[in-house]
Each structure stands twice: as C-alpha cells, then as structure tokens.
Image (cartoon, rainbow, N blue to C red):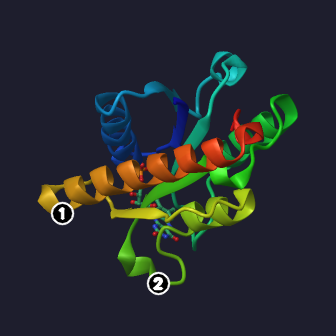
C-alpha cells in the first residue's frame, strides 16, 4: 500500500514511534511517506495514498496539539477527509495524567476520523522489548485491516 504517516511531536517521543512504525511498514513491503506536520504538507498531500497513519503527542488534559489540528484542516481542505477504515492512530502520552486524559489526542483523532482500528498508546519515549513488540504488532494489525477494507470496497482507496 501507499501510506502517508503524519505525526506531531514536541520533544521527540512521537517522532521516535513514527520512525519505528515507518520502518516496520517499509520492512513489510509498503511504500511510506513520513511527514512532520509542523512542516509544509503540500507535497505529501498531493501524493495518492491508500492509508493514513497519524501519530500525535497529547497536550494539556487530553487535548490535540495545534499543529495536528492545523494539519487535519489542511487535509480536509485539500484532499478531503479520508474514510475512517483507511485511518489508524497512535500516540504517546504520560499515564500520570490519568486514564481519562492519557494519550487523549490520539483517541480524539481516532474518534474524529471514525477509525475502527485500535489506538496504539506508548508512554513517553518507546523503550524495551515490550514497546518494540507493541509497535510491530500494532503496525502489522492495522495494515492488514486496512488492506482488507480496501479489498472489500475498492472505493475506499485514497485515505
Ligand atoms: C503542556 C503539556 C501537557 C500534557 N498533557 C498531557 C495529557 O493530557 N495526557 C497525556 O497523556 N500526556 C500529556 N502530556 C505528555 C506528553 O503528551 C508526552 O510527554 C508525549 O510523549 C510528548 O510527546 P513528544 O515528545 O512527541 O512531544 C503533556 C505534556 C505537556 C508538555
């Protein structure tokens, strides 16, 4: 599949998860474009794609950071919002914010897009075998599910 992975990262945690997800996508034979939403998204959004992966840190009390909101608005105004089955979301956060707000932005984004896929949550910077396993398993799972959705309904391409 042709995948756009767009992420927002203030201090590098989500960037590291994004890089690991990107590496897994490429290792399993997919075409991957990695975009920091703080930059110019024009060229990336002009490319056709089958899947959109979104990675986001969480701002104050479960909020979506401004740079990710701006990217979503640009996406809506350029290509239009993709169908939910073509979108999967991951995030980093801190459990000390409590279960209601932990990785809240990732959950808000998943709800906004109507993504039916599981949300990957990583506590701060990924480390250790457990996080590596979780990242690989999430990536493999959501890509398989998105491919199934595309085959079931080819009109769902261009996430
Ligand atoms: C002002 C501020 C507010 C935060 N609020 C939350 C929050 O509500 N929920 C959460 O899970 N993490 C929260 N965090 C923690 C960050 O989301 C977390 O450290 C994340 O891994 C940062 O990712 P980044 O390094 O990609 O920027 C907050 C961090 C900051 C600086």
Residue 6 lies, in percent from the top left, at 55, 37
Is residue 137 or residue 145 the one in the foreground? Answer: 145
Residue drawn at x 39%, y 49% as measured from the top left:
139
Residue drawn at x 53%, y 54% as measured from the top left:
89
Residue 51 lies, in percent from the top left, at 59, 38
Of the four image quadrants, the one with ligand 1 is: bottom left
Counting residues from the N terminus, which is met first, the one under dot 1 or under dot 2? 2
Which residue corresponds to mark 2?
99
Looking at the picture, does residue 99 appear above or below residue 146? below
Label 2 beta carbon within 8 A of ligand 1: no
Q: Is residue 4 left or right of residue 153?
A: left
Tags 1 and 2 in contact by the CB under 8 Å rule? no
Residue 29 lies, in percent from the top left, at 36, 27
For mark 2, give the secondary structure. loop
Q: Is residue 38 left or right of residue 55?
A: right
Looking at the picture, does residue 123 appear above or below residue 159? below
Q: What is the tally of numbered marks visible in this picture?
A: 2
Other-residue count near label 2 (Cα within 10 Å), few / some / many at <14 / 14–19 / ≥20: few
Looking at the picture, does residue 101 appear above or below residue 13? below
Which residue corresponds to mark 1?
130
Which image quarter is the C terminus in? Answer: top right
For mark 1, give the secondary structure. helix
């Amino acid at each position: 599949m042709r995948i756009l992975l767009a992420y927002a990262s203030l201090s590098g945690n989500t960037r590291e998860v994004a890089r690991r997800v990107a590496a897994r996508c490429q290792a399993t034979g997919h075409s991957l474009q990695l975009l920091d939403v703080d930059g110019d998204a024009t060229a990336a959004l002009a490319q056709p794609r089958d899947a959109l992966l979104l990675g986001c840190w969480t701002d104050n009390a479960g909020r979506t950071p401004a740079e990710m909101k701006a990217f979503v608005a640009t996406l809506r105004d350029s290509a239009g919002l993709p169908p939910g089955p073509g979108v999967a979301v991951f995030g980093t956060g801190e459990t000390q914010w409590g279960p209601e707000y932990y990785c809240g932005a990732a959950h808000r984004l998943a709800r906004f897009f109507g993504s039916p896929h599981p949300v990957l949550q990583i506590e701060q910077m990924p480390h250790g075998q457990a996080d590596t396993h979780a990242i690989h398993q999430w990536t493999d799972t959501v890509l398989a599910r998105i491919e199934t959705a595309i085959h079931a309904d080819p009109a769902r391409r261009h996430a």
